[in-house]
Amino acid sequence: MVYDRKKDKFPDQFGRSVRAMSDYLGVGVQIAASFAFFVFLGYWGDSKLGTSPLLMLAGVLVGMVGMGLVLMKIVRKANRNHDLNQQQRGNHEKDLRI
Amino acid sequence: MRVKANSKILALIVPVLLSLNSLVCANPVQEDMSAHESLPAAAAPAEVHAPVEVHNAAGTHVETAHESAVEGHEEKAGDVIMHHVQDSNVLAFEPFGEIELPHLQLGSLDISITKHVVMMWVAAVILILVGAAAGAGVKKISVKQAPSGIANVMEALVDFIRLDVAKSNIGHGYEKHLPYLISVFFFILVCNLLGLIPYGATATGNINVTLALSIFTFFITQIAAFKELGVGGYVKHLTAGTHWSLWIIMIPIEIIGQFTKPVALTIRLFANMTAGHIIILSLIFISFILESYIVAAAVSVPFAIFIYLLEIFVAFLQAFVFTMLSALFIGLATAHESHDSHELEASGHH
């Protein structure tokens, strides 16, 4: 079956956009949930050990570090994808066999 | 000149409409109310448009009567809207009566057959019939002929899911996941469209349904990741390539991240389908709340029709987006670090 890429512009472009966004789709919820997770972990530890508010503050710190890590991971991946795309751009035009 | 003519026409029409308004007052809620013996309400709308200065003494009396009548309303607009979008044990066919659906208990679980369950069954039956018809249509023709009718439509959609969604997002080995993706696309599509026909209900406007669909996606994603990467590779996937001293932070975050994706899928589909229905009903109820034909003709009906058409588009779009993201998550889970970019596979070489 011959698939004409010129005819079906929207899904193709939409798909490419979604793929480009895919790293950032869940990142907001992920950051929020993980931050809350560490803070509540500290809070729960405090209530168990009676060391309020030390563990909760530690949880806030760890959560902040975690956010930084998530952002770093995303930036690194974005860089890598960018480099890959740059490399492929040369071959990309040849690959379109219509 | 044209503006002048328009304003003249308006000046003629508006009083007529207003007088009609106070005479006829076609408010279906009040027809229900005759059973609730709150007849003052029938007189109340006429008072609404009358200037307040006219009845200084009687005004208070009329106002209280109107208020008590409104409070006596069994169904305010908001209640009607919520009743419409929520699940219930009744299939209502408005002028013809209604069907009570059975309550079932399984231990402490409530497994009643509700409106949305019935709609899902209807969707399943429709899909089976359409699929059987399309299959028969394809069987009848030879390889050289093009399919026609329903088989043609289905072939276009299935091929679209196969190439544009599954193949471009998953890449190698997409055939394994194709049945799930096509099923989920058509099921969501039919459920969405069933909500837009009279006497229908939107099963996908129920968060339990969308959550169940997302859970399928979640499990398929996880199993595919385990199969593709193996246990060691899966754990390495979780560490996201960070230094080992940071694993204690990174692993919980990545695990949380695995769960946030299906939750986002759930909320997206549910909120889109529910919001559309609430908007349409709200627009229709504006004319009932303001009790005016002008608002009905100028605002409610055209805007409701516009949103309805938009909803038809959204029904297709949300089914597509859910399928697309399911495919994307499967693709991300099975992607090797070596080829993160799927662009090469996406460039469709047959």
Image (cartoon, coloured by chain):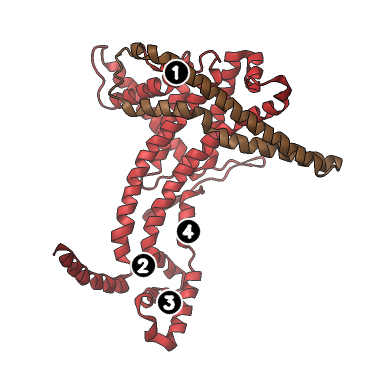
Chain colours: A brown, B red
Inter-mark Cα distance, 2 to 1: 60 Å
Q: Chain of mark 2?
A: B
**Mark 2 residue type:** Glu
Mark 4 sits on what residue? Answer: B78
Inter-mark Cα distance, 3 to 2: 16 Å
Mark 2 sits on what residue? Answer: B291
Direction from residue B128 to residue A32 in the image, left or right: right
Judged from this view, the residue extending furthest toward the bottom is B57
Mark 3 sits on what residue? Answer: B40
User: What is the crowding at mark 2: few (fewer than 14 residues within 10 Å), some, or many (at least 20)?
Assistant: many
Q: How many numbered marks, from 0 up?
A: 4
Select label 3 or label 1 by which is in front.
1
Select label 4 or label 1 by which is in front.
1
Direction from residue B114 to residue A97 in the image, left or right: left
- Element type where label 3 sits in the image: helix
Q: Chain of mark 3?
A: B
Labels 4 and 1 touching (C-beta < 8 A): no
**Mark 4 residue type:** Gly
